[in-house]
Image: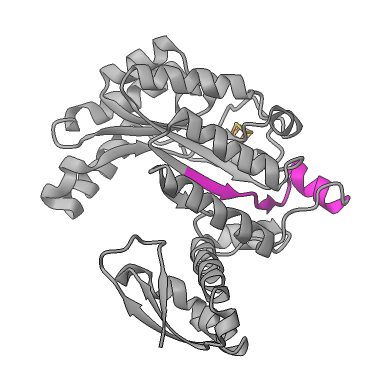
Amino acid sequence: MPHNGCPHKCTFCNQKNIVGQAYQPNADDVKNAVETAISSLKENTKEAEIAFFGGSFTAIDRDYMLELLNAAKPYMGQFKGIRLSTRPDCIDDEIVSLLKSYNVTSIELGAQSMDDDVLRLNERGHNSADVRKACGIIKNYGISLGLQMMTGLYGSDFYKDIYTADEFIKLRPDTVRIYPTVIMKDTQLADLYNSQRFIPYTLEQSVDLCSKLILKFKNENIRIIRLGLHYSESLENNSLGNNYHPAFKELCENKIFFDKITKLIKNYSDKEVDFFEAYVNPHSVSKLAGQNKSNINILNSMGYKIKIKTDQSIDEYEIYIKQR
Ligand code: SF4
């Protein structure tokens, strides 16, 4: 979805570059995209949703919004429903009731932070009360709720980001997306960064924070459907600050296992054991090993030899060790 016409000026958004260049999809584009999905998904469309993403769907011109919804309508028997993203202050009873009548099954809100100072400093144009109110309305209509947060925004810190996650948990979303702030050229954030008024998290700090957020949401059975921005050449070429990593989630998961195994090993420190078998879920073997076996290599350099074994019965982020 295009951002055209957005009246806001969020510090991290390079809307200046987007406006006027973005192509506005029309009803035919929706139809073509859905037909393409049908031919590749074959009969597996029943569990899929048609998604309108990228902009604030409920803030676009009403006739245009209805044109897109009407284009998706004939496919509602074949697909589970419609998923869309929008701003918290663009949600009210009237619009959600309308969306429900078009079989919208999931709404994601770009909340970004639950700290009102952070929202104000980043010129989001909404506050945390708007987020809470919108969540209540969406849940009242039985629509699946998604919340998006940005870590490391201007004015934020580790504690404010953890607070945002804790407030999200109280709102019981079905899904969350976590986007570490990336400084794009031609944004207010870039100006703040260039004048040293904004010091972003280092990649290491960001990984440390987000590894904790993964466990926080996991413990509450809230699914993280995205962590870190999708790679694109334009992102790589137009970002500043060296804190973007294309495999960010993987780094966070490696960190979770590194922290857990070093904690477990410490229990043996007085017994002078240095050979361990580490048991993880089969899906987590590479997460424990780390990128290019980085975790194993660090543990080796600390004097510990680790043999990774699998145990189907344990959870994706669980681990136990046995001395060999
Ligand atoms: S991020 Fe902010 S400024 Fe950019 S399009 Fe969305 S609401 Fe508008």
In magenta stretch: residue 187:
yes
Residue 47 visible to an observer of this rendering: yes
* Residue 321 quadrant: bottom left
Q: Regarding ligand 1, which quadrant of the image does it lie in? A: top right
Q: Who's the residue at 64% across and 57% down the image? A: 206
User: Residue placed farthest to the right in the image?
Assistant: 195
- For the N terminus, give its image quadrant: top left
Q: What residue is drawn where x is 14% and y is 36%? A: 78
Q: From the viewer's perspective, tell me whether residue 266 is left or right of residue 45.
A: right
Is 15 in front, or is 240?
240
On the image, the x and y values in percent for residue 36 come to: 23, 49
Most foreground residue, 12 or 269? 269
Q: Residue furthest top?
A: 94
Direction from residue 1 to residue 302 in the image, left or right? right
Task: Choose top left, top right, bottom left or bottom right for residue 150.
Answer: top right
Residue at figure coordinates x 36%, y 74% from the top left: 279
Q: Position of residue 311 (x, y in %)?
A: 29, 71
Residue 24 against residue 178 in the figure, above or below: above
Above or below residue 138? Residue 30 is: below
Residue pictured at 59% horizontal, 80% vertical: 269
If the image is split into quadrants, where does the C terminus sit?
bottom left
Horizontal arrangement in the rendering, residue 11 relative to residue 295 (left or right): right
Q: Residue 112 at what x, y percent from top left?
A: 59, 37
| Direction from residue 47 to residue 205 in the image, left or right | right
What span is in magenta?
177-195
In the rendered image, the residue lying farthest to the left is 43
213 above or below 73?
below
Q: How many marks?
A: 0
Regarding residue 13, the answer to whether it shows in the image is no
Please say whether residue 13 is one of the residues in the magenta stretch.
no
Q: Camera-side residue: 190 or 284? A: 284
Is the residue 18 above or below the residue 321 in the image?
A: above
